[in-house]
Image (cartoon, rainbow, N blue to C red):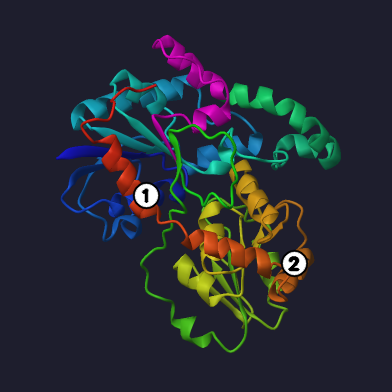
């Protein structure tokens, strides 16, 4: 059987679960499936197909969160060099016919060195070919230093230099191995023999997309968890689903929940085990984790970090999104959702609880109904599992080239 190696950089849960979901999409018994990650959470891998697991090193979520908070590089050349060495040992052991990676930058060195085709999974809002008016200003320390207005004016001019700065350690490592530089962060994130976008193309318009870049459609996942005991108490009035996931800014969460509790709604909160809400009001129902698809379906509005994971779950269920992004990935995802008329973006570090409540009231009143309806249709128009099966079969067909960048 052809061997496929999935490699996840376990910075957030999304990188792992998206690859597990794609592995599940492949026909049972047709491929030998291998999965490399820094952790193998039972809630993610329960019910997964037969995956040979390989433990690898990843920077911890806390390390990455600190780097993002300070606007510094996530990976140094030394760290990436260590990653490449580990990748090469893994590839030599597995001898895969295809490597599928999610945010594992080192594969852009290790896969070409071993001449193994590499498919990169990424969101299209990172693509150099995405049609955008501008890049949103993230919560960078320079915002506090200069103020939001001046930082917003400076940011577009600085962005090309910033993106080259972030890509330089990997480009340096590629040069050491005789590989061409990629140039910038967007080019790095979307590089591979195959680039797979986990989005509906209707939500992220592109122009001049290379032939090796393909939209899969949304890659959706929800944990198979028992519903909490309070679930059956819901249903008498509208519900609001609140979660900031594994990477949102938690500082304002208790205040936002308290503000929403003043509305004639039930508030469902999933904390991802990151915070404890002491003595919540009677109409606030809390769990560490909830099946996101069922929670979004039960809700009338979803309040989240604006990232694609929960945001796309909400849109698939026809629910508007009030997004509170913190890092650039979340800002990018939510900016496209807002542009599509599916919700509203509020800066996580500046949004007042009363403002969040006002936006939720507007969403409950149908402020985003037309955009949400269009987005829901787009979400269901694409079968990411079937598209992935087709692309894998094509790449591994005898006539397909095994060349690598």
Q: Residue at x 59, y 32 (%)?
A: 128
**Residue 51 percent across, percent down from the top left:** 22, 48
Q: Secondary structure at mark 2?
A: helix
Q: Is residue 232 above or below residue 179?
A: below
In the rendering, which numbered label is found on residue 35?
none
Q: Which residue is mark 1?
A: 387
Is residue 80 or residue 179 the one in the foreground? 179
Q: Which residue is mark 2?
A: 359
* Image quarter of residue 97: top left
Outermost residue toward the bottom? 236
Q: Residue at x 55, y 86 (%)?
A: 235
Regarding residue 315, the answer to whether it shows in the image is no
Q: Which residues are magenta?
A: 167-196
On-image quarter of the C terminus: top left
The CA span between labels 1 and 2 is 36 Å
**Residue 79 percent across, percent down from the top left:** 44, 24
Regarding residue 281, the answer to whether it shows in the image is yes
The reply to whether the magenta stretch includes residue 174 is yes
Q: Secondary structure at mark 1?
A: helix
**Residue 177 percent across, percent down from the top left:** 39, 12
Q: Nearer the viewer, mark 1 or mark 2?
A: 1
Specify whether 98 is left or right of 296.
Answer: left
Q: Are marks 1 and 2 in contact (CB under 8 Å)?
A: no
Q: Which sits earlier in the primary sequence, circle 1 or circle 2?
A: 2
* Image quarter of residue 400: top left
């Amino acid at each position: 059987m052809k061997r496929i190696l999935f490699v996840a950089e376990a910075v957030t849960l999304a990188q792992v679960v998206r690859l597990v979901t794609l592995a599940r999409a492949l026909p049972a018994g047709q491929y030998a499936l291998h999965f490399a990650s820094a952790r193998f959470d039972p809630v993610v891998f329960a019910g997964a197909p037969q995956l040979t697991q390989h433990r690898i090193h990843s920077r911890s979520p806390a390390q990455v969160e600190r780097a993002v908070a300070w606007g510094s590089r996530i990976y140094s050349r030394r760290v990436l060099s260590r990653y490449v060495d580990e990748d090469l040992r893994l590839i030599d052991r597995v001898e895969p016919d295809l490597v599928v990676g999610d945010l594992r930058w080192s594969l852009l060195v290790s896969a070409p060195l071993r001449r193994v085709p590499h498919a990169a999974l990424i969101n299209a809002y990172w693509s150099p070919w995405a049609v955008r008016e501008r890049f949103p200003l993230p919560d960078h320390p320079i915002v506090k230093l200069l103020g939001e207005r001046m930082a917003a004016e400076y940011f577009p001019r600085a962005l090309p230099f910033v993106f080259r700065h972030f890509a330089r350690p990997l480009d340096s490592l590629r040069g050491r191995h005789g590989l061409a530089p990629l140039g910038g962060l967007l080019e790095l994130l979307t590089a591979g023999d195959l680039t797979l976008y986990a989005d509906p193309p209707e939500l992220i318009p592109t122009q001049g997309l290379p032939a090796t870049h393909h939209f899969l459609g949304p890659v959706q996942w929800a944990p198979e968890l028992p519903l909490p005991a309070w679930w059956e108490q819901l249903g008498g009035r509208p519900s609001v689903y609140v979660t900031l996931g594994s990477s949102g800014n938690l500082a304002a969460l208790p205040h936002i929940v308290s503000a929403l509790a003043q509305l004639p709604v039930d508030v469902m909160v999933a904390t991802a085990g990151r915070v404890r809400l002491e003595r919540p009001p009677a109409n606030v129902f809390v769990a560490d984790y909830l099946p996101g698809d069922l929670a979004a379906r039960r809700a009338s509005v979803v309040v989240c970090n604006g990232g694609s994971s929960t945001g796309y779950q909400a849109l698939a269920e026809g629910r508007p999104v009030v997004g509170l992004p913190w890092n650039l990935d979340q800002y990018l995802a939510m900016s496209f959702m807002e542009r599509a008329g599916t919700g509203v973006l509020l800066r996580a570090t500046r949004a007042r609880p009363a403002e969040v409540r006002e936006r939720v009231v507007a969403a409950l009143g149908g402020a985003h109904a037309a955009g949400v309806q269009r987005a829901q249709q787009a979400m269901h128009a694409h079968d990411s599992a079937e598209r992935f099966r087709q692309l894998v079969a094509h790449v591994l067909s005898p006539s397909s080239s095994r060349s690598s960048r």
